[in-house]
Image: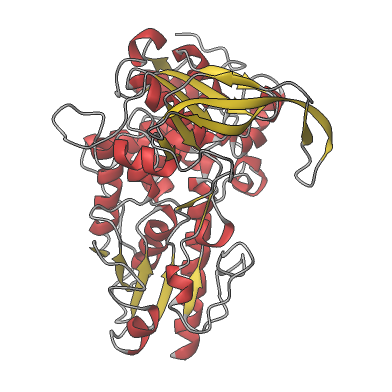
Amino acid sequence: MAVDVLKKIPVREQEPQVRATNFDEVCLGYNKEEAMNEASRCIGCKVDKAKCISGCPVNINIPGFIAQVKEGNFEAAYQVISESSALPAVCGRVCPQENQCEGKCIRGLKGEAISIGKLERFVADWAKENGIKPTVSAPKNGHKVAVIGSGPSGLTCAGDLAKMGYDVTIFEALHKAGGVLVYGIPEFRLPKDKVVAAEVENVKALGVKIETNVIIGKSVTIDELLTEEGFEAVFIGSGAGLPMFMGIPGEQANGVFSANEYLTRNNLMKAFRDDYDTPIKRGAKVAVVGGGNVAMDAARTALRLGAETHIIYRRSEAELPARAEEVHHAKEEGVIFDLLCNPVEILVDENQWVTGIKCVRMELGEPDASGRRRPVAVPGSEFVIEVDTVIMSLGTSPNPLISSTTYGLDVNKKKCIVADEEFGKTSKEAVYAGGDAVTGAATVILAMGAGKAGARGIDAYIKSKNA
Protein backbone atom coordinates (compact mmCIF):
# COMPACT_ATOMS: atom_id res chain seq x y z
CA MET A 1 0.00 0.00 0.00
CA ALA A 2 1.10 3.59 -0.61
CA VAL A 3 2.32 5.27 2.57
CA ASP A 4 1.69 8.94 3.28
CA VAL A 5 5.03 9.88 4.83
CA LEU A 6 3.48 12.86 6.62
CA LYS A 7 0.94 10.84 8.60
CA LYS A 8 1.31 8.04 11.14
CA ILE A 9 -0.01 4.60 10.33
CA PRO A 10 -3.13 4.38 12.54
CA VAL A 11 -3.00 1.99 15.50
CA ARG A 12 -5.92 -0.35 16.08
CA GLU A 13 -7.74 -0.05 19.44
CA GLN A 14 -10.74 -1.59 21.14
CA GLU A 15 -13.88 0.47 20.62
CA PRO A 16 -14.51 2.76 23.63
CA GLN A 17 -17.93 1.32 24.50
CA VAL A 18 -16.46 -2.21 24.46
CA ARG A 19 -13.21 -1.60 26.35
CA ALA A 20 -15.01 0.37 29.09
CA THR A 21 -16.52 -2.95 30.19
CA ASN A 22 -13.37 -5.09 30.25
CA PHE A 23 -9.74 -5.08 31.42
CA ASP A 24 -8.25 -6.23 28.12
CA GLU A 25 -5.54 -4.08 26.57
CA VAL A 26 -6.94 -0.95 24.90
CA CYS A 27 -4.29 -0.58 22.19
CA LEU A 28 -3.92 -3.58 19.88
CA GLY A 29 -0.61 -2.51 18.35
CA TYR A 30 0.82 -2.87 14.85
CA ASN A 31 1.02 -6.02 12.75
CA LYS A 32 4.12 -6.71 10.61
CA GLU A 33 2.90 -4.81 7.54
CA GLU A 34 1.79 -1.79 9.60
CA ALA A 35 5.09 -1.71 11.50
CA MET A 36 7.18 -1.88 8.32
CA ASN A 37 5.06 0.83 6.70
CA GLU A 38 5.41 3.10 9.72
CA ALA A 39 9.17 2.45 9.82
CA SER A 40 9.41 3.44 6.15
CA ARG A 41 8.34 6.98 7.14
CA CYS A 42 11.58 7.47 9.13
CA ILE A 43 14.10 9.64 7.29
CA GLY A 44 17.01 7.76 8.90
CA CYS A 45 18.94 10.47 10.71
CA LYS A 46 22.56 9.58 11.45
CA VAL A 47 23.08 8.50 15.05
CA ASP A 48 25.18 11.54 15.95
CA LYS A 49 22.45 13.87 14.65
CA ALA A 50 19.32 11.94 15.67
CA LYS A 51 17.44 14.15 18.09
CA CYS A 52 15.12 11.28 18.99
CA ILE A 53 18.04 9.53 20.72
CA SER A 54 18.80 12.56 22.88
CA GLY A 55 15.10 12.68 23.78
CA CYS A 56 15.20 9.12 25.11
CA PRO A 57 16.28 8.86 28.77
CA VAL A 58 17.94 5.49 28.07
CA ASN A 59 19.42 6.59 24.69
CA ILE A 60 18.12 3.80 22.49
CA ASN A 61 19.58 3.82 18.97
CA ILE A 62 16.17 4.66 17.51
CA PRO A 63 17.16 5.14 13.85
CA GLY A 64 19.13 1.89 14.07
CA PHE A 65 16.25 -0.27 15.26
CA ILE A 66 13.71 1.41 12.97
CA ALA A 67 15.96 0.77 9.96
CA GLN A 68 15.89 -2.94 10.82
CA VAL A 69 12.09 -2.91 11.18
CA LYS A 70 11.80 -1.25 7.77
CA GLU A 71 13.65 -4.22 6.24
CA GLY A 72 11.69 -6.81 8.24
CA ASN A 73 14.75 -7.72 10.37
CA PHE A 74 12.80 -7.82 13.64
CA GLU A 75 15.30 -9.90 15.64
CA ALA A 76 18.10 -7.49 14.75
CA ALA A 77 15.83 -4.59 15.73
CA TYR A 78 15.22 -6.22 19.12
CA GLN A 79 18.92 -6.67 19.80
CA VAL A 80 19.55 -2.99 18.96
CA ILE A 81 16.90 -1.94 21.47
CA SER A 82 18.14 -4.42 24.08
CA GLU A 83 21.58 -2.83 24.08
CA SER A 84 20.00 0.12 25.89
CA SER A 85 16.66 -1.02 27.36
CA ALA A 86 15.71 -3.92 29.60
CA LEU A 87 11.97 -3.21 29.27
CA PRO A 88 11.06 -2.45 25.64
CA ALA A 89 7.56 -3.99 25.77
CA VAL A 90 6.80 -1.87 28.83
CA CYS A 91 8.26 1.36 27.44
CA GLY A 92 6.49 0.90 24.14
CA ARG A 93 3.21 0.99 26.06
CA VAL A 94 3.59 3.49 28.90
CA CYS A 95 6.38 5.96 28.04
CA PRO A 96 5.35 9.56 27.32
CA GLN A 97 6.98 9.44 23.89
CA GLU A 98 5.18 12.59 22.79
CA ASN A 99 7.30 14.57 25.25
CA GLN A 100 10.53 12.64 24.65
CA CYS A 101 11.75 10.79 21.56
CA GLU A 102 8.73 11.53 19.35
CA GLY A 103 8.69 15.11 20.59
CA LYS A 104 12.14 15.61 19.04
CA CYS A 105 11.56 13.60 15.85
CA ILE A 106 12.69 15.52 12.76
CA ARG A 107 9.85 14.03 10.73
CA GLY A 108 7.51 15.78 13.17
CA LEU A 109 8.69 19.19 11.97
CA LYS A 110 6.76 18.58 8.77
CA GLY A 111 3.96 16.12 9.30
CA GLU A 112 3.49 13.70 12.19
CA ALA A 113 6.36 12.24 14.20
CA ILE A 114 7.27 8.58 13.75
CA SER A 115 5.32 6.29 16.12
CA ILE A 116 8.52 5.26 17.90
CA GLY A 117 6.76 3.83 20.93
CA LYS A 118 4.39 1.69 18.90
CA LEU A 119 7.32 0.36 16.85
CA GLU A 120 9.26 -0.47 20.01
CA ARG A 121 6.23 -2.31 21.36
CA PHE A 122 5.85 -4.26 18.11
CA VAL A 123 9.50 -5.36 18.13
CA ALA A 124 9.39 -6.42 21.79
CA ASP A 125 6.14 -8.34 21.34
CA TRP A 126 7.49 -10.04 18.21
CA ALA A 127 10.62 -11.08 20.10
CA LYS A 128 8.55 -12.61 22.90
CA GLU A 129 6.30 -14.49 20.48
CA ASN A 130 9.37 -15.89 18.72
CA GLY A 131 11.42 -16.76 21.82
CA ILE A 132 14.13 -14.15 21.23
CA LYS A 133 16.13 -13.12 24.31
CA PRO A 134 18.62 -10.27 24.84
CA THR A 135 22.23 -11.34 24.43
CA VAL A 136 24.64 -11.49 27.39
CA SER A 137 27.76 -9.52 26.56
CA ALA A 138 30.27 -10.34 29.32
CA PRO A 139 31.36 -13.34 31.41
CA LYS A 140 30.90 -13.27 35.20
CA ASN A 141 33.50 -11.13 36.93
CA GLY A 142 33.05 -12.46 40.48
CA HIS A 143 31.69 -9.23 42.03
CA LYS A 144 28.34 -9.21 43.89
CA VAL A 145 25.86 -6.32 43.77
CA ALA A 146 22.49 -6.00 45.53
CA VAL A 147 19.55 -4.13 44.01
CA ILE A 148 16.62 -3.07 46.18
CA GLY A 149 13.32 -3.06 44.36
CA SER A 150 12.24 -4.81 41.15
CA GLY A 151 10.54 -1.83 39.54
CA PRO A 152 11.81 -0.15 36.38
CA SER A 153 14.91 1.43 37.95
CA GLY A 154 15.92 -1.76 39.77
CA LEU A 155 15.34 -4.05 36.80
CA THR A 156 17.27 -1.72 34.51
CA CYS A 157 20.21 -1.36 36.88
CA ALA A 158 20.31 -5.11 37.48
CA GLY A 159 20.11 -5.90 33.76
CA ASP A 160 22.91 -3.51 32.85
CA LEU A 161 25.16 -4.81 35.63
CA ALA A 162 24.50 -8.41 34.60
CA LYS A 163 25.52 -7.56 31.04
CA MET A 164 28.79 -6.21 32.48
CA GLY A 165 29.40 -9.52 34.24
CA TYR A 166 28.24 -8.77 37.80
CA ASP A 167 26.50 -11.29 40.04
CA VAL A 168 23.29 -9.38 40.81
CA THR A 169 20.52 -10.12 43.30
CA ILE A 170 17.31 -8.07 43.42
CA PHE A 171 15.45 -7.89 46.73
CA GLU A 172 11.71 -7.22 46.35
CA ALA A 173 9.37 -6.46 49.27
CA LEU A 174 6.22 -7.79 47.60
CA HIS A 175 5.44 -11.37 46.58
CA LYS A 176 5.74 -10.64 42.87
CA ALA A 177 8.49 -8.88 40.92
CA GLY A 178 7.81 -5.79 38.84
CA GLY A 179 7.25 -2.99 41.34
CA VAL A 180 4.97 -0.23 40.06
CA LEU A 181 4.64 -2.13 36.78
CA VAL A 182 2.58 -4.81 38.55
CA TYR A 183 0.84 -2.87 41.32
CA GLY A 184 0.42 0.60 39.84
CA ILE A 185 -0.44 0.41 36.13
CA PRO A 186 -3.76 -1.19 35.12
CA GLU A 187 -4.03 -4.37 33.10
CA PHE A 188 -5.73 -2.54 30.23
CA ARG A 189 -2.61 -0.40 29.75
CA LEU A 190 0.06 -2.93 30.70
CA PRO A 191 -0.83 -6.65 30.76
CA LYS A 192 0.93 -8.32 33.67
CA ASP A 193 1.44 -11.90 32.45
CA LYS A 194 1.86 -11.12 28.76
CA VAL A 195 4.23 -8.17 29.19
CA VAL A 196 5.60 -7.48 32.69
CA ALA A 197 6.29 -11.10 33.65
CA ALA A 198 7.96 -11.70 30.29
CA GLU A 199 10.24 -8.66 30.72
CA VAL A 200 11.17 -9.80 34.24
CA GLU A 201 12.05 -13.23 32.84
CA ASN A 202 14.30 -11.58 30.25
CA VAL A 203 16.21 -9.84 33.04
CA LYS A 204 16.50 -13.15 34.91
CA ALA A 205 17.79 -14.74 31.69
CA LEU A 206 20.78 -12.40 31.96
CA GLY A 207 21.65 -14.15 35.23
CA VAL A 208 19.91 -11.80 37.68
CA LYS A 209 18.47 -13.46 40.80
CA ILE A 210 15.28 -12.10 42.38
CA GLU A 211 14.31 -12.70 46.00
CA THR A 212 10.74 -11.68 46.83
CA ASN A 213 9.14 -11.02 50.25
CA VAL A 214 12.33 -9.33 51.51
CA ILE A 215 11.72 -5.98 53.19
CA ILE A 216 14.95 -4.02 53.34
CA GLY A 217 15.09 -2.32 56.73
CA LYS A 218 13.20 -5.19 58.40
CA SER A 219 14.23 -8.52 56.87
CA VAL A 220 17.79 -7.25 56.41
CA THR A 221 19.43 -3.81 56.36
CA ILE A 222 21.65 -2.25 53.74
CA ASP A 223 24.53 -2.23 56.21
CA GLU A 224 24.10 -5.98 56.71
CA LEU A 225 24.08 -6.57 52.95
CA LEU A 226 27.43 -4.80 52.71
CA THR A 227 29.12 -6.14 55.83
CA GLU A 228 27.64 -9.62 56.30
CA GLU A 229 26.20 -10.79 52.97
CA GLY A 230 29.23 -10.13 50.75
CA PHE A 231 27.75 -7.49 48.45
CA GLU A 232 30.26 -4.89 47.28
CA ALA A 233 27.66 -2.27 46.33
CA VAL A 234 23.94 -1.63 46.65
CA PHE A 235 21.51 0.16 44.33
CA ILE A 236 18.32 1.49 45.92
CA GLY A 237 15.42 1.50 43.47
CA SER A 238 12.62 1.13 46.00
CA GLY A 239 10.26 3.65 44.42
CA ALA A 240 7.87 6.06 46.09
CA GLY A 241 4.90 4.20 47.48
CA LEU A 242 3.83 6.40 50.39
CA PRO A 243 0.61 8.21 49.38
CA MET A 244 -0.10 11.87 50.03
CA PHE A 245 -3.43 13.26 51.26
CA MET A 246 -5.04 16.71 51.40
CA GLY A 247 -5.74 16.86 55.13
CA ILE A 248 -9.40 17.86 54.63
CA PRO A 249 -12.30 16.81 56.92
CA GLY A 250 -13.66 13.35 56.23
CA GLU A 251 -10.49 12.01 54.63
CA GLN A 252 -10.34 9.13 57.14
CA ALA A 253 -13.88 7.95 56.31
CA ASN A 254 -14.87 4.53 55.06
CA GLY A 255 -14.81 4.56 51.27
CA VAL A 256 -11.72 6.77 50.92
CA PHE A 257 -8.74 5.17 49.19
CA SER A 258 -5.33 6.30 48.13
CA ALA A 259 -4.84 5.61 44.43
CA ASN A 260 -1.93 3.37 45.40
CA GLU A 261 -4.11 1.10 47.53
CA TYR A 262 -6.95 1.07 45.03
CA LEU A 263 -4.73 0.17 42.09
CA THR A 264 -2.70 -2.37 44.07
CA ARG A 265 -5.83 -4.24 45.11
CA ASN A 266 -7.05 -4.25 41.55
CA ASN A 267 -3.78 -4.90 39.68
CA LEU A 268 -1.57 -7.06 41.85
CA MET A 269 -4.37 -8.72 43.85
CA LYS A 270 -6.67 -9.12 40.80
CA ALA A 271 -9.76 -7.55 42.39
CA PHE A 272 -11.24 -7.05 38.91
CA ARG A 273 -11.47 -10.82 38.39
CA ASP A 274 -14.46 -12.77 39.64
CA ASP A 275 -12.27 -15.78 40.50
CA TYR A 276 -10.17 -13.70 42.98
CA ASP A 277 -11.63 -12.95 46.43
CA THR A 278 -9.93 -9.58 46.90
CA PRO A 279 -11.98 -7.02 48.86
CA ILE A 280 -12.50 -3.74 47.04
CA LYS A 281 -15.34 -1.23 47.12
CA ARG A 282 -17.06 -1.24 43.75
CA GLY A 283 -18.71 2.13 44.22
CA ALA A 284 -21.75 3.28 42.29
CA LYS A 285 -20.33 6.82 42.04
CA VAL A 286 -16.59 7.43 42.41
CA ALA A 287 -14.60 10.66 42.61
CA VAL A 288 -10.89 10.62 41.81
CA VAL A 289 -9.01 13.66 43.07
CA GLY A 290 -6.00 14.55 40.90
CA GLY A 291 -5.06 14.99 37.25
CA GLY A 292 -1.97 12.87 36.61
CA ASN A 293 -1.53 9.51 34.91
CA VAL A 294 -2.25 7.65 38.15
CA ALA A 295 -5.53 9.55 38.52
CA MET A 296 -6.50 8.53 34.97
CA ASP A 297 -5.59 4.91 35.76
CA ALA A 298 -7.70 4.93 38.93
CA ALA A 299 -10.66 6.59 37.21
CA ARG A 300 -10.63 4.24 34.24
CA THR A 301 -10.35 1.28 36.62
CA ALA A 302 -13.35 2.44 38.68
CA LEU A 303 -15.30 2.91 35.46
CA ARG A 304 -14.57 -0.67 34.42
CA LEU A 305 -15.75 -1.87 37.83
CA GLY A 306 -19.14 -0.33 37.03
CA ALA A 307 -19.02 3.14 38.60
CA GLU A 308 -20.02 6.55 37.32
CA THR A 309 -16.60 8.13 37.64
CA HIS A 310 -15.53 11.75 38.11
CA ILE A 311 -12.07 13.31 37.86
CA ILE A 312 -11.81 16.34 40.15
CA TYR A 313 -8.90 18.62 39.28
CA ARG A 314 -8.24 22.13 40.47
CA ARG A 315 -6.80 23.48 37.21
CA SER A 316 -8.08 23.47 33.62
CA GLU A 317 -7.66 20.76 31.00
CA ALA A 318 -4.64 22.58 29.53
CA GLU A 319 -2.77 22.05 32.83
CA LEU A 320 -3.62 18.37 33.27
CA PRO A 321 -0.29 16.60 33.89
CA ALA A 322 -1.53 13.26 32.51
CA ARG A 323 -0.58 12.12 29.03
CA ALA A 324 -2.89 13.48 26.33
CA GLU A 325 -3.52 9.91 25.16
CA GLU A 326 -4.71 8.84 28.62
CA VAL A 327 -7.02 11.86 28.94
CA HIS A 328 -8.40 11.16 25.46
CA HIS A 329 -9.05 7.51 26.29
CA ALA A 330 -10.69 8.39 29.62
CA LYS A 331 -13.05 10.83 27.91
CA GLU A 332 -13.91 8.33 25.18
CA GLU A 333 -14.78 5.74 27.82
CA GLY A 334 -17.11 8.05 29.72
CA VAL A 335 -15.09 9.47 32.63
CA ILE A 336 -16.59 12.82 33.73
CA PHE A 337 -14.09 15.66 34.16
CA ASP A 338 -14.94 18.23 36.86
CA LEU A 339 -12.20 20.75 36.16
CA LEU A 340 -11.37 23.97 38.02
CA CYS A 341 -12.75 22.35 41.17
CA ASN A 342 -11.04 21.63 44.49
CA PRO A 343 -12.33 19.40 47.33
CA VAL A 344 -12.75 21.05 50.73
CA GLU A 345 -14.56 18.28 52.63
CA ILE A 346 -15.61 14.65 52.28
CA LEU A 347 -19.16 14.21 53.55
CA VAL A 348 -20.09 11.13 55.59
CA ASP A 349 -23.16 9.50 57.15
CA GLU A 350 -23.67 8.45 60.76
CA ASN A 351 -21.61 5.30 60.17
CA GLN A 352 -18.71 7.26 58.70
CA TRP A 353 -19.28 6.10 55.14
CA VAL A 354 -18.73 8.54 52.27
CA THR A 355 -21.88 10.23 50.92
CA GLY A 356 -20.41 13.05 48.89
CA ILE A 357 -17.52 15.39 48.28
CA LYS A 358 -17.86 19.15 48.79
CA CYS A 359 -15.87 21.22 46.31
CA VAL A 360 -15.22 24.86 45.56
CA ARG A 361 -14.95 26.37 42.09
CA MET A 362 -11.52 27.65 41.09
CA GLU A 363 -10.13 30.19 38.67
CA LEU A 364 -6.58 30.51 37.42
CA GLY A 365 -4.37 33.33 38.67
CA GLU A 366 -0.68 34.07 38.17
CA PRO A 367 1.84 31.27 37.44
CA ASP A 368 3.35 29.50 40.47
CA ALA A 369 6.78 27.88 40.89
CA SER A 370 5.79 25.04 38.53
CA GLY A 371 5.10 27.53 35.73
CA ARG A 372 1.39 26.70 35.73
CA ARG A 373 -1.21 29.31 36.66
CA ARG A 374 -2.08 29.10 40.33
CA PRO A 375 -5.69 28.07 41.07
CA VAL A 376 -7.61 30.46 43.32
CA ALA A 377 -10.91 29.62 45.06
CA VAL A 378 -14.02 31.52 43.94
CA PRO A 379 -15.82 32.80 47.09
CA GLY A 380 -19.28 31.35 47.67
CA SER A 381 -18.97 28.73 44.93
CA GLU A 382 -19.19 25.57 47.06
CA PHE A 383 -21.16 22.62 45.67
CA VAL A 384 -21.50 18.91 46.40
CA ILE A 385 -20.96 15.89 44.14
CA GLU A 386 -22.81 12.86 45.51
CA VAL A 387 -20.41 9.90 45.58
CA ASP A 388 -19.89 6.82 47.74
CA THR A 389 -16.16 6.38 47.06
CA VAL A 390 -13.27 8.85 46.91
CA ILE A 391 -9.81 8.01 45.52
CA MET A 392 -7.00 10.42 46.39
CA SER A 393 -4.37 10.62 43.63
CA LEU A 394 -2.16 13.48 44.80
CA GLY A 395 1.28 11.94 44.40
CA THR A 396 3.53 9.78 46.53
CA SER A 397 6.79 10.00 48.44
CA PRO A 398 9.39 7.36 49.37
CA ASN A 399 8.75 5.11 52.34
CA PRO A 400 11.25 6.24 55.02
CA LEU A 401 11.99 2.67 56.20
CA ILE A 402 15.18 2.29 54.15
CA SER A 403 16.65 5.71 54.91
CA SER A 404 15.81 5.43 58.62
CA THR A 405 17.59 2.07 58.93
CA THR A 406 20.69 2.92 56.90
CA TYR A 407 23.49 4.74 58.69
CA GLY A 408 24.90 7.75 56.82
CA LEU A 409 22.29 7.91 54.05
CA ASP A 410 21.19 11.51 53.45
CA VAL A 411 17.61 12.43 52.50
CA ASN A 412 16.06 15.79 51.61
CA LYS A 413 13.06 17.48 53.23
CA LYS A 414 10.70 15.36 51.11
CA LYS A 415 12.35 12.17 52.48
CA CYS A 416 13.81 11.43 49.05
CA ILE A 417 17.30 9.92 49.01
CA VAL A 418 19.95 12.40 47.90
CA ALA A 419 21.92 11.04 44.92
CA ASP A 420 23.79 12.63 42.03
CA GLU A 421 22.15 12.45 38.62
CA GLU A 422 25.14 11.22 36.60
CA PHE A 423 25.98 8.10 38.60
CA GLY A 424 23.36 7.78 41.35
CA LYS A 425 26.01 8.12 44.07
CA THR A 426 24.62 8.73 47.58
CA SER A 427 26.25 10.07 50.74
CA LYS A 428 27.04 6.50 51.83
CA GLU A 429 29.99 4.68 50.31
CA ALA A 430 29.07 1.80 48.00
CA VAL A 431 25.39 2.80 48.01
CA TYR A 432 23.73 4.19 44.87
CA ALA A 433 20.12 5.14 44.25
CA GLY A 434 17.75 6.20 41.50
CA GLY A 435 14.18 6.43 40.30
CA ASP A 436 11.25 7.55 42.42
CA ALA A 437 13.20 6.92 45.65
CA VAL A 438 15.35 9.89 44.62
CA THR A 439 13.03 12.08 42.53
CA GLY A 440 9.65 11.31 44.02
CA ALA A 441 6.94 9.93 41.74
CA ALA A 442 7.94 10.25 38.07
CA THR A 443 7.76 8.20 34.86
CA VAL A 444 8.87 4.64 34.15
CA ILE A 445 11.42 5.72 31.57
CA LEU A 446 13.02 8.33 33.85
CA ALA A 447 13.38 5.63 36.51
CA MET A 448 15.03 3.40 33.92
CA GLY A 449 17.47 6.17 33.00
CA ALA A 450 18.37 6.49 36.67
CA GLY A 451 18.89 2.72 36.86
CA LYS A 452 21.36 2.92 33.98
CA ALA A 453 23.18 5.76 35.73
CA GLY A 454 23.39 3.71 38.91
CA ALA A 455 24.84 0.76 37.01
CA ARG A 456 27.54 3.00 35.52
CA GLY A 457 28.33 4.41 38.95
CA ILE A 458 28.56 1.00 40.61
CA ASP A 459 30.74 -0.38 37.80
CA ALA A 460 33.15 2.56 38.12
CA TYR A 461 33.19 2.27 41.93
CA ILE A 462 33.96 -1.46 42.03
CA LYS A 463 36.60 -1.17 39.34
CA SER A 464 38.29 1.66 41.25
CA LYS A 465 38.26 -0.40 44.46
CA ASN A 466 39.87 -3.36 42.70
CA ALA A 467 42.32 -1.46 40.51
Q: Residue at x 28, y 42 (%)?
A: 268
Q: Give above or below for 242 relative to 232.
A: above
Quarter of the image that includes the N terminus: top left
Residue 299 visible to an observer of this rendering: yes
Q: Residue 199: where, in percent of width, then height?
A: 30, 47
Q: Residue furthest left?
A: 275
Picture layout, residue 12 above or below residue 171: above
> Residue 11 location, x and y as percent?
44, 18
The residue sitting at 38% across, 54% down in the picture is 151
**Residue 118 appears in the rendering:** no
- Whether 394 is drawn above or below 331: the answer is below
Q: Residue at x 37, y 18 (%)?
A: 284
Q: Quadrant of residue 417?
A: bottom right
Nearest the viewer among 398 and 19 is 398
Please report the residue visible at 52 percent of the width from the left and 35 percent of the height from the top: 293
Q: How is the image coloured?
A: secondary structure
- Residue 230 rendering spot, x and y as whole percentages: 30, 86
Query: In the current view of this chain or complex, which residue is farthest to the front?
Result: 350
Q: Is residue 171 left or right of residue 348?
A: left
The mark tally for this picture is 0
Depth check: give the residue in front, 230 or 277. 277
Using the image as rendered, state which of residue 222 and residue 160 is in the foreground. 222
The picture places residue 360, in percent across and down from the top left corner, at 68, 26
